Image (cartoon, helix red, strand yellow):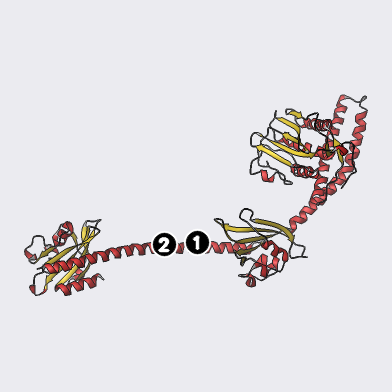
Amino acid sequence: MLSRILQWIETELEAEAASVMVIDEKHRHLRFVAATGEKAEQIKDFTVELGHGIAGHVAATGEALLINDAASDPRQAQDIAQAVDFPVTTVLAVPMHLHGEVVGVVEALNKREAAPFTEDDAGLLAVIAQQAAMFLDSARLYAELQQRVDFANAELREANARLNDEKARVETLVEQMASGVVATDARDRVILINNAAEQMLQLSKAAALGEPILAVVDDNRIADLFARPLSIESGVHIEQMELPAGSGRIVRLHLALVEDNLQHLGKCLVMTDVTHFVELNRMRTDLISFVSHELQNPLSALDGFVTLLAADTAHLSTESNSYIQQIDRLTKRMQYLVADFLNISRIEADRPLFMRWKTIDSSGLQHLTDNIIELQRHDTASHNFITDIPDDLPPLRADRHKLEEILTNLISNAIKFSPQGGTVKVAAQTEGNFVKISVSDEGIGISEQQMPHLFQRFRRLHENEQKKVSGTGIGLFLCKHLVEAHGGTIEVESEPGIGSTFSFTIPIADADQQGQAEDASSS
């Protein structure tokens, strides 16, 4: 475009040569960006200092110069003319202005037939120079934009390459997963399904992709699962079923809502084969039940023998009496443990607990608590025990042995997780139609992260603590079910480093129940 402009200048002004120079702000000189004439290619290698030569003077002052006797003008840069062997006789140079500043110079040299340049020529060249300045600025902006676009395209290509690599890794990972994975879009159309899901759902990936999940899945249970409403607040459904039906394979299904910035994007179903774990769990439950039943009879016999020995200790030495007391204490502890495991086996088999209902008044509850504390004292010599059971506490309707199991587990935990010299308090108070019993300690407490796992079976909350404590990990799990079997609830308040308080409720016996020593058992 600049070359065409210069050619037009040559034609209209009848000049032998023309050039466009721009200011290099970094080096403070003019450089040629376009030129015409027989020396055009040679002259592009030169630069002109600001203030030097006619073009340098124009650039420095911002004023046009019309010189028709350049040979005798002291401002003429003779060195360039001599270097390229191009004598200059007449010169018309005008500044290029942009945003109020000089950005370059346009020159016309040697009007043909030795004619002089005129003011009209100068006016015309000034207009052309202004257009050239605007063109150069547009070219600069375009170059910058092009550079930014090229940079953005490079970044985009790099991002796409990373995304493709990540997509390939994810797809490989999903395909190799043993768990089945099915993903749908916001309209419940299948967008992803791996090999394991094909086998579990007995469908073809080619036929399923892009189709509504409800149209391609034959199992009504899966269809019903996808049809259930999911919200961002509660965006998860968990099921366990035999899949395919009749195969004997137990699958755990986890359907989650996929969302971004509160926008529903689709759903993802993960299906994990848990047959092995279910079988192991069943075997463990059967083993616990078998061992517990096998231990029950010899422990009962041992307890009977110890009771007989304890009834006639007058002729025995002090050391022998101590041995009998230890045997009695350890026997009772074993009986508690066996009772715990028997109850666990019934709970895991989804069978109701055997309840032997009795009415227990405040003195009975106090006596029960004192016996448990006395039994626990053999494991600690430094803990302090406090009981706060009012005499006017209304009678409870409870299974005495199961109430004893609850208190034994809670008091034992309070001792285990309390520092030496700490205080364990057992209190009771009326709360509506229930009596609320609480066990408090001054122990290490329970963090918020551990709270959701409190009442899970075989879960030890402080396994990573430096202080190692013994236990089976079923105490709180069992307490929860024993309390619920009474129709009550259990809860905990805790502050790490301060202590914990476990509270549970047992129903108050009504007037008819208070008159009965013991009701008929139910199972």
Tally the marks. Answer: 2
Q: Residue at x 49, y 64 (%)?
A: 161
Q: Examine the image and state in which quarter residue 173 appears.
A: bottom right
Element type at mark 2: helix
Q: Is residue 320 above or below residue 185?
A: above
Reading the image, the residue beneath label 1 is 162
The answer to whether residue 50 shows anywhere in this view is no
Disc 2 marks a residue whose amino acid type is Ala
Task: Give the class, few, some or many, for how many residues have Cα within 10 Å of label 2's Cα (few <14, many ≥20).
Answer: few
Looking at the image, which is closer to me, 446 or 420?
Answer: 446
Q: Residue at x 8, y 70 (%)?
A: 116
Residue 485 location (% of width, % of height): 80, 45
Residue 172 location (% of width, % of height): 59, 64
Residue 201 location (% of width, % of height): 70, 67
Q: Residue at x 41, y 62 (%)?
A: 152
The answer to whether residue 354 shows anywhere in this view is yes
Q: Is residue 402 above or below residue 363?
A: below
Disc 1 marks a residue whose amino acid type is Arg
Callout 1 touching callout 2 (CB < 8 Å): no
Reading the image, the residue beneath label 2 is 152
Residue 113 location (% of width, % of height): 9, 75
Can you tell which of label 1 and label 2 is closer to the viewer?
2
Q: Examine the image and state in which quarter residue 361 appears.
A: top right
Residue 377 got which mark? none
Q: CA distance from mark 1 to mark 2?
A: 15 Å
Name the side, left or right, on which 359 lies relative to 50: right
Task: Give the class, few, some or many, for how many residues have Cα within 10 Å of label 1's Cα (few <14, many ≥20).
Answer: few
Name the side, left or right, on which 325 lies relative to 22: right
Give the mark nearer the N terminus: 1 vs 2. 2
